[in-house]
Image: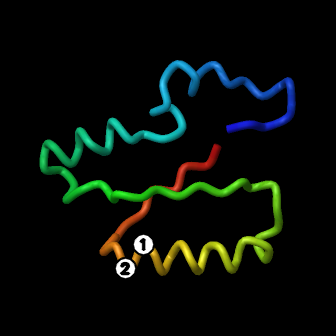
Amino acid sequence: MSHVSSNFDRSGFQQDINVVFPIDRLRELAGAGRIGSVADYHYSVMGATTPEDLETATHEMAGHLKADGVDAVLLVPI
């Protein structure tokens, strides 16, 4: 994450990536059998754009997720 504002506090996710991307928690849930599995690939977008400008990329991501058999996603707004 590289927001240009000096007011953007990076300290939380620099200490623990799970603050913004809970990969370890997801793996724990999968290991405990609470969820089926964790996808092999993960996607991120920079929100400083209009939804129309992201449309092509999101359709491509959806296609990849579907091809990988993903049936649920976790959206984490940062």
Question: In the rendered image, which quarter contains the N terminus?
Answer: top right
- Residue 2 higher or lower than 15, as above or below: below
**What residue is shown at x 84% (from left), y 25% (from top)?**
7
Disc 1 on helix, strand or loop? Answer: helix
| Quadrant occupied by the C terminus | top right
Q: Quadrant of residue 8?
A: top right
- Identify the residue at image location x=27%, y=43%: 27
Residue bearing mark 2: 67
* Pointer 1 with pointer 2, Cβ within 8 A: yes
28 lies above or below 65: above
In the rendered image, residue 49, in percent from the top left (x then y), is placed at 82, 62
Q: What element carries label 2?
A: helix
Residue 51: give its label: none
| Residue 65 numbered mark, or none | 1
Relative to 27, does residue 38 appear above or below in the rendering?
A: below
Front residue of 2/49: it is: 2
x then y, percent, for residue 24: 33, 36
* Vertical relation: 74 (above or below) 3: below
**Is residue 26 toward the left or the right of residue 54 in the image?**
left
Disc 1 marks which amino acid? Leu
Residue 53 in the figure: left or right of residue 25: right
Q: Residue 16: horizontal and vertical position, in percent?
A: 48, 24
Nearer to the camera, 63 or 73: 63
